[in-house]
Image (cartoon, rainbow, N blue to C red):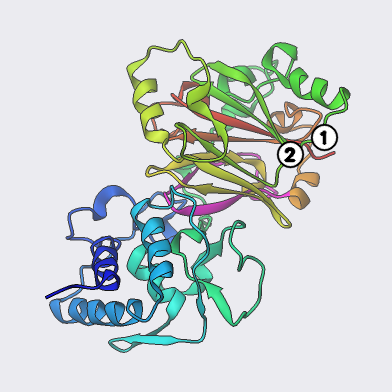
Amino acid sequence: MFRTKRSGLVRRLWRSRAPVEGDGEADRGTTHGSGGCCMGKATKVAKSGAGSEAELKALTHSILKKIKEKQLEVLLQAVESKGGARSPCLLLPSKVDAKVGQQSYSLPMLLYKVFRWPDLRHSSELKRLSCCESYGKINPELVCCNPHHMSRLCELESPPPPYSRYPMDYLKPPDSPDSGPSSSETGGTTYSAPVGLSDSLAMQESGERSHWCVVAYWEEKTRVGRLYSVQEPSLDIFYDLPQGNGFCLGQLCSDNKSQLVQMVRAKIGYGIQLTREPDGVWVYNRSCYPIFIKSATLDNPDSRTLLVHKVFPGFSIKAFDYDKAGSLQRPNDHEFTQQPRTGFTVQISFVKGWGQCYTRQFISSCPCWLEVIFNTR
């Protein structure tokens, strides 16, 4: 009996569905509830009973077999590469509903649940990536159903747990009694010429197209390479070619022989995506491991301490808010008086976190990390 190409694509897609607890792959850190994203708590998804699993399989097969072969190939490319390969939009009718048990889902939601997030409950937990044709469109007849053109929203915890607070003592001015380590030890540099902000200022003075941010890559206390100036609205920061278009960290020359640094380098993979959008700058974790972010605009405006936020794979977080930044310039706060004249910074560590709940108290002890300097002028 001959099997059609369409049937073969459908079977490959079903084998590539997102695992749930009990499938053997669910503990890789890819299925987390939105409430646990920044609190560092994974939301486990109970494995479906045999009946519901069979029902879901039958429904998914039925829907996929109605999709054109070319569209199935697009979906398969996105799913098998886990978003690493640039795949086009998968435009399908948005009004089609599917029912699993007592629960009804729109066609996009069903595909997102099957191929990325089995614990997904509502579309409000999602954010569409700016690369998608459906980005910014309201109730279109055709909507992109490519699961890797979406991300999960990272919800900030409230109130923040004390273990993730950036210690108050480390934010004391360096000349105060019993002050903590200097700004350069924490990774919040003072931006004198040796650090490299002068590179950015020189680019601006030379008449080059204005950048909205510059990115510095660090390995522990050593900056690797020059500052990367960003003019395009979106930037991929990744380790190995051809995993993205943008800032390839693997192309930089580093003399660091630390085994830990080399291990973390190997885990950066697809890395992150920085995107400047109307409401701020978003960071999307494209890698298979958590990233950790510290940003002044992620915290309560009345707080004098900064939190380190854990962002799981597949999640997005608004790392910088231009509106909030203007109200955060408080001269008595050491954290803000050390910011450069061109704007604020966001610090991002790959794989390893820092703060009171980790052995690393400062980001400069993290193996591989980024400093994103925003130009707010």
The residue where tag 1 is placed is 209
**Rendered location of residue 284, percent (x, y):** 53, 49
Q: Is residue 374 left or right of residue 287?
A: right
**Rendered location of residue 229, percent (x, y):** 70, 31
Residue density around tag 2, few if under 14, some if 14–19, many if 20 or more, within 10 Å: some
Q: Residue at x 53, y 53 (%)?
A: 316
Label 1 residue SS: loop
Which amino acid type is marked by label 2? Gln
Label 2 residue SS: loop
| Residue contact between numbered discs 2 and 1, judged by CB atoms under 8 Å | yes
What's the mark number on residue 231?
2
Q: Residue at x 46, y 86 (%)?
A: 96
Depth order, front residue of 333/261: 261
Q: Is residue 222 left or right of residue 34?
A: right
Which amino acid type is marked by label 1? Arg
Q: Which residues are magenta?
A: 300-321
Q: Residue at x 25, y 55 (%)?
A: 26
Q: Is residue 226 left or right of residue 165?
A: right
Q: Is residue 374 visible?
A: yes
What's the mark number on residue 350?
none
Q: CA distance from mark 2 to mark 1?
A: 7 Å
Q: Residue at x 38, y 42 (%)?
A: 289
**Rendered location of residue 144, percent (x, y):** 53, 70
Magenta stretch holds residue 304: yes
Quadrant of res 6? bottom left
Depth order, front residue of 318/362: 318
Residue 302 versus residue 101 in the image, above or below = above
